[in-house]
Image (cartoon, rainbow, N blue to C red):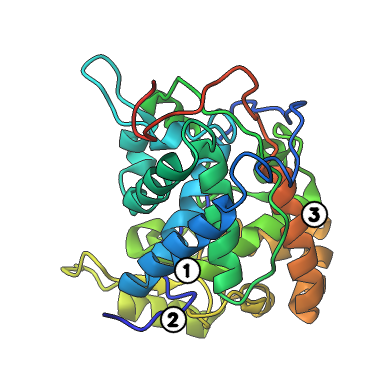
Amino acid sequence: MATFAPKTIFSLAFVLLLTIVPQSKAALNAQFYDQTCPHAEKTILETVYSASIYDPKVPARLLRMFFHDCFIRGCDASVLLDSTAGNQAEKDGPPNISLRSFYVIDDAKAKLEAACPRTVSCADILAIAARDVVTLSGGPYWNVLKGRKDGRVSKASETINLPAPTFNVSQLIQSFGKRGLGLKDLVALSGGHTLGFSHCSSFEARIRNFSAVHDVDPSMNIEFARELRNKCPKPNKDRNAGQFLDSTSSTFDNDYYRRLVLGKGVFGSDQTLVGDYRTKWIVESFARDQILFFREFAASMVKLGNVGVVEDGEVRLKCRVVN
């Protein structure tokens, strides 16, 4: 069995949907299960921790899963639903095909159904698990507001609107703004890339034939560009080749921002944050002050967790299928 290196990461594509998912007016609270399922959070933490010992890629996968859930239809566990004969679900949309570790949520749900039947929603399990993997990776802790219901609709076609890693700040501001998330949320939540890994295909356009004038994106550090070109040769026979999005791949920290300041952002949508006056000052603040980043990341995760919360949904008995 592998030793758990808390932030060991395989892939975290931090992407957001463009269609409107408003901030919810549903009443969530941190004590929602105190009477009905008092050991819910402990059960989820133990399940996540055990899975991460067995597979160190689990933390990044669960955090990514939470983002993908909340930015499509809000935080309603729609990303967990399986496709059926008559419907292709979100998890089978092109951007979500690489999502993994659904079994961790399934395991936590099974334990909670045995202890507290029909009580804890899959949406809340995923929100709590996302907090736990950040904390286990050395990042901040926050009280997860609970009381979400599970949605009944999941459509792969809606994943077509996920923004590309080529987005500029104006496009990102528009995307986040439609979800009630502001500039500081945009920059703070982008820090989730501290747990990120990208395959070559997602940044290939920045390191070769970038434009008619520049072979390499001029906003990229030239030595870093050479490093990426060596890791992603043409032709490239290694399907797993790629680059971590920061240099401390086993710790949730502010190294992601320090690298942006140095021109070492992997995605164009990352590097653009330091190239635009509207976001540059926030990037520089987080690069200087990790405590500030942790505080703002936690606050933005609470805010993200309230996006599009379902009020008239259900508590699924199994997270992969509606009741």
Q: Nearer the viewer, mark 1 or mark 2?
A: 2
**Cα distance, mark 2 to mark 3?**
29 Å
Residue at 53% x, 35% y is: 121
Residue at 70% x, 27% y is: 22
In this rendering, would 286 be left or right of 91?
right
Give percent across and percent down for residue 152.
Answer: 46, 20
Tell whether label 3 touches label 1 (CB within 8 Å): no
Q: Is residue 26 visible?
A: yes
In this rendering, would 102 be left or right of 310?
left
Q: Amino acid at mark 3?
A: Lys
Q: Nearer the viewer, mark 1 or mark 3?
A: 3
Give percent across and percent down for residue 142.
Answer: 72, 60
Q: Is residue 67 above or below residue 155?
A: below
Task: Tell me the SS state at disc 3.
Answer: helix
Which residue in the protein does label 2 denote? Answer: 5
Q: Residue furthest top?
A: 86
Query: Would you identify the image quadrant in which residue 289 lies?
Result: bottom right
